[in-house]
Image (cartoon, grey):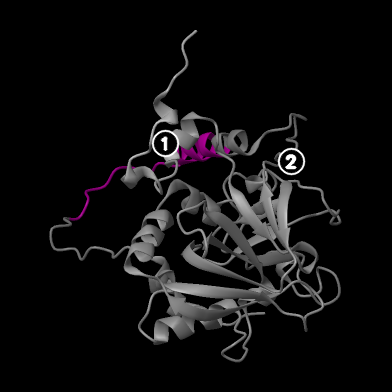
């Protein structure tokens, strides 16, 4: 049997740093999204729920290429078990209402939910936790993979000095300078003064033009979009909760069932047709981008 010799030949110069595109990764079955965990106050590289590496340094340098447009939420009914990955009992991507794929939502809206009241969790905390999901690149490997970075509430809200800012303050600070986050190398640092894992943010330097072009492309990739939409449990490949019929659904099945359910409800509630007003002179609704919403965020603990 003859051997394929193509990959033993000299690689063209333009391909030496090209890497593997998302299409090839998908077709080859390499679809696992990587994430950076800060469990135990240590930076941990996770793939499909398995820790593949860790960095015990207090700081890392990253490029933030995408982020959730809203503060997300997630709720677990049971107690946390270290090392165990399971889907939350209820969660919200927009912070306003439970996700459509949630089988047993805790309430119709997040604002009116009993799990959103201070004291419903341990001590004075909320049982339903805030989180901000970001898509980041490692600053020393901008051509490499996208990582999901999920910020707990202490890393999002509050105020710090310019060397140790929580994320909302950092985003607003960068915006106030008329700059974009994806043009910068950002230092993320574990706060040694916090009793629970907490990150702070600081700008370090600008990207080169070539690095910025790569950052923009990576920020619009399927991996980056998944990073800001998926819960950490989904990223780790956790199963959804059992349904009333006792079948364990994976995340894709649960979301598919929710879509069908929503379609049925919509079909049952279609109102009588009315004449639609002309949209000729209607003003188009501008599409919001990540950098457009950071100035509208408010501090909330």
Residue 173 marker: none
Above or below residue 43? Residue 50 is above
Residue projecting furthest to the bottom: 161
Q: Position of residue 232 (x, y in %)?
A: 66, 53
- Front position among marks 1 and 2: 1
- Left or right: 176 in relation to 72: left
- Left or right: 204 in relation to 231: left
Q: Quadrant of residue 217?
A: bottom left
Please give the residue where the numbered disc 2 appears in the rendered image: 241
| Residue 197 visible in rendering | yes
Which residue is drawn at the image coordinates 61% and 80% (left, top)?
166
Q: Position of residue 64 (x, y in %)?
A: 49, 66
The Cα–Cα distance between marks 1 and 2, rounded to whole angstroms, is: 31 Å
Q: Which residues are magenta?
A: 258-277
Asked if the residue at tag 2 contacts the one at tag 1, i.e. Cβ–Cβ closer than 8 Å, the answer is: no
Q: Position of residue 41 (x, y in %)?
A: 77, 69
Q: Nearer the viewer, residue 105 or 76?
A: 76
Q: Position of residue 117 (x, y in %)?
A: 74, 72
Quadrant (top left/top right/bottom left/bottom right) for the C terminus: bottom right
Q: Nearer the viewer, residue 38 or 255?
A: 38
Q: Is residue 253 magenta?
A: no
Q: Nearer the viewer, residue 264 or 127?
A: 127
Query: What kind of element bears circle 1?
Result: helix
Q: Is residue 265 magenta?
A: yes
Above or below residue 84? Residue 155 is below
Label 1, residues with CA under 10 Å away: few <14, some 14-19, many ≥20:
few
Residue projecting furthest to the left: 280
Please give the residue where the numbered disc 1 appears in the rendered image: 23
Above or below residue 276? Residue 206 is below
Above or below residue 267? Residue 118 is below
């Amino acid at each position: 049997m003859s051997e394929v010799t193509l990959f033993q030949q000299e690689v063209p110069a333009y391909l030496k740093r090209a890497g593997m595109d998302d299409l090839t990764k998908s077709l080859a079955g390499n679809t696992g999204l990587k994430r950076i965990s800060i469990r135990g106050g240590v930076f941990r590289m996770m793939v499909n729920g398995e820790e593949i590496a860790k960095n015990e340094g207090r700081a890392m340098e990253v490029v933030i290429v995408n982020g959730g447009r809203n503060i997300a939420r997630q709720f677990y009914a049971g107690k946390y078990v270290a090392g165990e990955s399971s889907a939350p009992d209820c969660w919200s991507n927009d912070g306003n209402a439970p996700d459509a794929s949630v089988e047993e939502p805790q309430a119709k809206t997040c604002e009116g939910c009993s799990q959103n009241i201070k004291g419903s969790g341990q001590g004075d905390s909320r049982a339903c936790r805030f989180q901000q999901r970001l898509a980041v690149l490692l600053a020393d490997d901008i051509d490499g993979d996208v990582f999901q970075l999920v910020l707990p509430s202490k890393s999002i809200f509050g105020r710090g000095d310019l060397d140790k800012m929580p994320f909302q303050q950092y985003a607003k600070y960068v915006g106030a300078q008329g700059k974009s986050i994806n043009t910068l190398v950002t230092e993320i640092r574990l706060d040694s003064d916090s009793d629970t894992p907490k990150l702070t943010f600081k700008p370090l330097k600008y990207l080169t033009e070539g690095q910025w072009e790569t950052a923009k492309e990576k920020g619009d990739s399927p991996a980056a979009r998944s990073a800001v939409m998926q819960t950490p449990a989904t990223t780790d490949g956790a199963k959804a909760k059992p349904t009333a019929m006792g079948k364990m659904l994976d995340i894709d099945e649960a979301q598919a069932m929710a879509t069908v359910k929503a379609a049925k409800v919509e079909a049952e509630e279609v109102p009588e047709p009315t004449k639609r007003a002309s949209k000729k002179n209607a003003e188009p609704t501008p599409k919001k981008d990540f950098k457009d919403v950071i100035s509208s965020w408010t501090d909330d603990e």
